[in-house]
Image (tube, grey):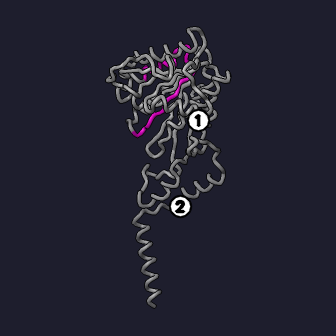
Amino acid sequence: MAESIFRKLRDGGEEGELAPALTIEETVASPFGLDVSGYLLTNLSSSILAGKSSSQGLVLITFSRSPSFYLQLLKQKGIVVSSSSKWIRILDCYTDPLGWIDQSSTSFSEGSSLIKLHKCVSDLKKLFSSIIEAGRELVGTGKTRFCVAIDSVNELLRHSAMPLVSGLLTDLRSHAQISSVFWSLNTDLHQEKVTNALEYISTMKANLEPLCPSSDGQRNALENLFSVHQDFGKGRFHVRFKLRKGRVRVMSEEYHVDQSGINFSPISSVDTVIAATKSLLPKASYLDLLFNYLVCVSCYNVISCS
């Protein structure tokens, strides 16, 4: 399913259509949206360099992590970004989002045009213009296209109202030279209407779910402390594709996060049976477990005394 998302972002939309857009939803229980973004970023970069993508450039807007983090991530995957790279531009909205640092906003030491410091991120019209300008530095002003990656819209929503952020994303989708766009969102930080608005803009939605979520969305710390520690970094990856004529396709697979990054694998039939069996078992509360434990201890003491 992650591969299906990647192919749609790589291939872009048909001429005259809005660009494909992906929202990657994470939660406090599964905070790995940026890992999914990194997976897509590295794969798209490889495709662009190999000439297998509909776009010939990539513009990355960083809010949650520094540009150096992403340069190191690409390097770990065997993609070395030099100061003269003609396929990527990074808009740094991480270093000085409020415009407090007194320095030129032209470039960083990595190169004269590779990384650009962008200040005052609340001015979304200026941000849109900077994104288009950065893309055209890569592909020119013709019909050649580039893709756009926003590592997180949470920071955007901290500085601007939802209608303005929605307008920015819609403008990016409708620009003739943008082939695809994706972003991550922590849904625990926003009201449901914000999540719904971003889902409405998107043609694809991916969300991460922990292995054993409780029915009320929370875990009992006393019951599940060990399992939370053991299963952290593992879970289900659900993807919803909006198809033509209002149809929707939903697919799922498993994910596992380790030092090498995030990995995806099919859901095994055995795991499906176990999950279904667990869902049929009655759920015991902590008090029930404590009561049963005390009963067992009492019976053991009675037997031992006799």
**Side of 162 relative to 204 (left or right):** left
Q: Which residue is mark 2?
A: 281
- First in sequence: mark 1 or mark 2? 1
Q: Marks 1 and 2: CB-CB under 8 Å? A: no
What residue lies at 38% left-to-right and 29% top-to-bottom? 157
Q: Give residue 5's quadrant in the image.
A: top right
State the residue lying farthest toward the top.
142
Q: Which residues are magenta?
A: 166-188
Q: Which residue is mark 1?
A: 76
Residue 140 in the image, given as x and y percentages of width and height:
57, 10
What residue lies at 49% left-to-right and 13% top-to-bottom? 133
Query: Where is 57 relative to 280, above or below?
Result: above
**Side of 120 relative to 10 (left or right):** left
Between the residue at mark 1 and the residue at mark 2, the CA separation in whole angstroms equals 44 Å
Query: What's the residue type where badge 1 is placed?
Result: Gln
Asked if one can make out residue 197 in the rendered structure from this viewpoint, the answer is: no
* Depth order, front residue of 72/28: 72
Residue 161 in the image, given as x and y percentages of width and height:
35, 25
* Depth order, front residue of 44/1: 44
What residue lies at 46% left-to-right and 91% top-to-bottom? 306
Question: What crowding class fits label 2: few (fewer than 14 Cα within 10 Å), some (14-19), or many (20 or more)?
Answer: few
Residue 9 in the image, given as x and y percentages of width and height:
59, 26
What residue lies at 59% left-to-right and 37% top-to-bottom? 250
182 within the magenta span: yes
State the residue lying farthest toward the bottom.
306
Question: What crowding class fits label 1: few (fewer than 14 Cα within 10 Å), some (14-19), or many (20 or more)?
Answer: few
Query: What's the residue type where badge 2 is placed?
Result: Leu
Q: Could you tell me which secondary element the residue under label 1 belongs to?
A: helix
Residue 184 in the image, given as x and y percentages of width and height:
48, 33
